[in-house]
Amino acid sequence: GITMQQAVERDAHNCSNYAMCANNPNRISKTFNDAALREMIDSIAHRTSLLLEIVNYNFEGQQYVCAGELTALQTLTNVLNYLKVEKIDVAKLTEKFTVEKVKEMLGKIIDNCHKRAEEQKQAEGHIKLERGFATIPLPGIDVPFHSRYLWAGVMPFRAYLSKKINVAQINPDMLVGKYVPNLVAIPLQVTSECAQKIYDQMSS
């Protein structure tokens, strides 16, 4: 935890530029589903060039945790609020327009919502995330846990652990069936199949 806390830059007030929030696509509309949320998040990250990604898939269709930069998370909140208030049904849009046209329309919404987030940052100096129709900020968390941002710290942390832990004294059998890695959410087994599932998830 300390290693991750030190992985992000902080200002004079010990504040970072990152946060996490939970998202429930069902709160936007009945047709705004898992795929729509993921597409929206990917589009925001692409159009703003900011860190924003789903890092925990807690409950299919109902709870996804995002990590990212504050401006990106505020943009996401603004976009989802806008879709809710204006009753924009993305699924129906795809029935009336081409995919390219729908992406163009949503892109304009994202750009406008991002502009509002930037203006908020300029006016207030620091974005304080507020609860939206479908977004709930996770208070006290100002590190983008589980995100690609922290990958750079993996090797140094691995090197540190290798100095502190004697591999010869490790008995993995004590963990079999008792430890549940959050990467794959299945009880640990010392098998090639279990190792492959973890590798497939993390490519590491």
Image (tube, rainbow, N blue to C red):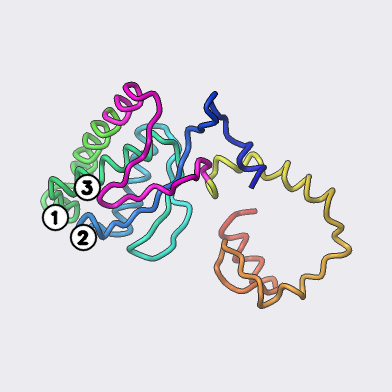
Q: Which amino acid, by three-letter code, is at mark 1?
A: Lys
Label whose residue precedes the other's in the sequence (3 or 2)? 2
Q: Nearer the viewer, residue 201 or 186?
A: 186
- In the rendered structure, which disc, 1 or 3, sits on the residue that comes first in sequence? 1
Magenta region includes residue 33: no
Q: Are marks 1 and 3 in contact (CB under 8 Å)?
A: no
**Mark on residue 31?**
2
Q: Percent x, y for residue 23?
A: 35, 53
Marker disc for residue 99: 3
Q: In terms of depth relative to the viewer, which is nearer, 93 or 153?
A: 153
**Callout 2 touching callout 1 (CB < 8 Å):** yes
In space, the residues marked 2 and 1 are separated at their CA atoms by 9 Å
Q: Residue at x 68, y 74 (%)?
A: 189
Give the side of residue 93 with respect to residue 126, left or right. left
Q: Is residue 11 left or right of residue 100?
A: right
- Judged from this view, the residue extending furthest toward the bottom is 177
Count numbered badges in the picture: 3
Q: Position of residue 116 (x, y in %)?
A: 26, 29
Magenta-tinted stretch: 116-144
